[in-house]
Amino acid sequence: MGPSESPQSAYREHVSSVCTVVEEALQVSADAGHAFDGVVFHSGTAASYHADDLGVPFRSTPHFARLTPLGGPGHLVLCRPGRKPLIAWVNPTDHWEEGPEPLDGAYAESIDVREAPDPLAAGILLGDLSRCAYVGNDPDLAQRLGMPAAAVEPRVLMAVLDWHRGFKTTWEIDCIREANRIAAAGHRAARAGFERRLSERRIHADYLEAIGALDGETPYPNIIAWDDRSAILHYQRKRTSRPDPGRSFLIDAGASCGGYASDVTRSYASPSAHPVFVEALDRMEDLQRDLAQSVEPGGSFVALHARAVAGVTAILCDLGVLRVGHSEALERKLALPFLPHGVGHHLGLQVHDVGGQQVDRAGRMRPPPDEHPYLRTTRDLAPRQVVTVEPGLYFVPQLLAPHRSGPDRGCFEWSLVDDLLPCGGIRIEDDVRVTESGSENLTRPVVPGHRESLGGAAA
Ligand code: GLY
Ligand code: MN
Ligand code: MN
């Protein structure tokens, strides 16, 4: 379930540190006048498609998943101060579905395990829950288990839990490192597919095959795009035809380990790409490496984003896409239509992990600056955080259209913009862990950049 090279003791320490966080959350909640005996974490109630008996693919709620990698709906974990967590896992007795794979090894030893046929029976196995808080997606179940509405995800308690999700344990970091190693096999296959100009759909299939995953087992839907489609940030079509002409290619695809995600993007240009696009790709590679290396404790993520915008601005000016100098282009914010997303986000059980805009355990939030509304991370960098660093440079027709007739229209070299539109865009994304003194790039050692050979990554 988790990284095979991580010692089992790392998992035990992980569970113990999550329990310490739960105790802290209970204490903070009690200090605020909402005393609870413990917290019930629910893996979740599964949903069906509207007016259908077909189930929507299920994912455990993340706070539950932080305590145990056991898959499937209905399970409950009770955490009480000074006690081992107690899981009542649901093993359905009907003949329609298989139960989850039972816990073994350190996963089972770190937790007391009981088995129940359904969630209500699981609740009964846990005992009197009327003085417990509930964390999960089904307030009705909480009520049926005896927990009042005020006990469902209380704000003060959740703020402490969410805040600490931002600091990864050694086991969690090992999971994300392993998720990068798994994704690397997929990225190798995808790059080979780029070189052979295979279809988006075929490259997607090759990626899944290489990482040994089914479609629903990746942490997010793969983005695999040739040419102009690489400028659609969440492009999902996966066309069946081979690319024509196949100038540029973008793949944003990760893998899961122990429930933890990797999130990795590479962009490539073929010899038929516009030479300015080829140069832009080289410059973006340098910019991304520079940004990733500058991640350090105490650093400001908002400042990192500003540096990404400044870097993209310089590239656009130097390559002649913008017809003004760096400082004027920066002042006029001319790069914004070319970089319409944040430079990164926290990464963990969720691809866009919780707490990126939370600045303290009391739940105070720092919204993104007005001009960068899509920046998901405003929290300052600190050891044990894992973030993505993913600058982009795209030629997006909808975003450029207003500038063609706006007050800044003379600042753009429109004929060059029009020549570059068919190449779409560039995004390069690594996962970076903040250390005590700097950072560790979890992606680069296993997924080479576009200038390096497939055999191994250069430093
Ligand atoms: N794969 C989604 C993202 O990069 O944020
Ligand atoms: Mn990302
Ligand atoms: Mn991504």
Image (tube, rainbow, N blue to C red):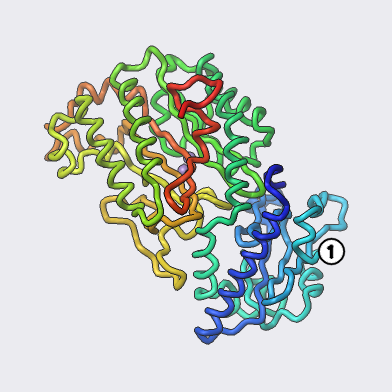
Query: In the image, is 410 to the left or to the right of 239?
Result: left
Q: Where 167 sits versus 309, above or below?
A: below
Visible residue check, residue 236: no
Q: Where 45 sits versus 372, above or below?
A: below
Residue lying furthest front? 437
- In the rendered picture of this protein, how many numbered marks are placed on residues? 1
- The answer to which quarter of the image holds residue 396 is top left
The percent coordinates of residue 132 (x first, y second) are: 66, 78
Disc 1 is placed on an element classified as strand
Q: Of residues 145 and 356, which is closer to you in this image?
A: 356
Q: Where 286 sits versus 70, above or below?
A: above
Q: Which residue is mark 1?
A: 115
Query: In the image, is 413 to the left or to the right of 366?
Result: left
Report crowding for label 1: few under 14, some 14 to 19, many 20 or more residues within 10 A (C-alpha): some
Query: In the image, is 33 to the left or to the right of 382?
Result: right
Visible residue check, residue 133: yes
Tell me the amino acid under the disc marked 1: Glu
- The answer to which quarter of the image holds residue 401 is top left
Whether ligand 1 has any atom under 8 Å from the Cβ at mark 1 is answered as no
The percent coordinates of residue 309 (x first, y second) are: 28, 42
Q: Where 275 sits versus 297, above or below?
A: above
Q: Residue at x 33, y 56 (%)?
A: 368
Residue lying furthest bottom? 33
The percent coordinates of residue 385 (x first, y second) are: 48, 54
The percent coordinates of residue 331 (x first, y second) are: 15, 44
Q: Of residues 207 and 18, which is closer to you in this image?
A: 18
Q: Residue at x 52, y 30 (%)?
A: 447
